[in-house]
Image: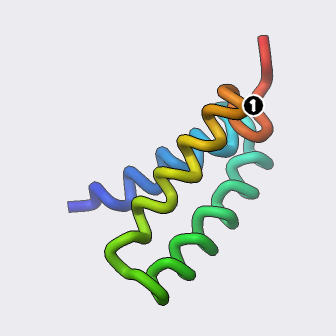
Amino acid sequence: MGLSLMLTAFIVVAIGGMGSVGGSAIAAVIVGLSEAYMAYYFPPGSLAVNMMIMALVLLLKPSGLFGATR
């Protein structure tokens, strides 16, 4: 109950970067569009694609798209 929404919110924050509101907003658009397109073409894979996007972003830039580096 609500696990899918929590997981989607975690993916958005992880992609956008912790503490970055602008990054989270851009990540929300990316995640929302990818989930909508995948739900149309291949419904069982919509969450898996978002997980792959998150993994790719965190492999390339571990702080997220707009996260601060220390």
Estimate the x, y position of residue 17 in percent, counting from the top left.
Answer: 68, 36
Helix, strand or loop at label 1? It is loop
Could you tell whether 47 is left or right of 55 in the image? left
Estimate the x, y position of residue 7 in percent, counting from the top left.
Answer: 39, 51
Display coloring: rainbow
Residue drawn where x is 78% and y is 10% of the image? 70
Q: Which residue is mark 1?
A: 67
Residue drawn where x is 62% and y is 34% of the image? 58
Looking at the image, is 59 positioned above or below residue 3? Answer: above
Foreground of the two, 11 or 39: 39
Estimate the x, y position of residue 51 in percent, counting from the top left.
Answer: 47, 51
Estimate the x, y position of residue 14 in percent, counting from the top left.
Answer: 58, 39
Q: Quadrant of residue 29?
A: bottom right
> What residue occupies the far top of the structure in this picture?
70
Q: Residues within 10 Å of mark 1 (few under 14, many from 20)?
A: many
Looking at the image, is 26 positioned above or below residue 10? Answer: below
Residue drawn where x is 54% and y is 41% of the image? 55
Looking at the image, is 65 positioned above or below residue 40? Answer: above
Q: Quadrant of residue 25?
A: bottom right
Amino acid type for the residue under numbered disc 1: Gly
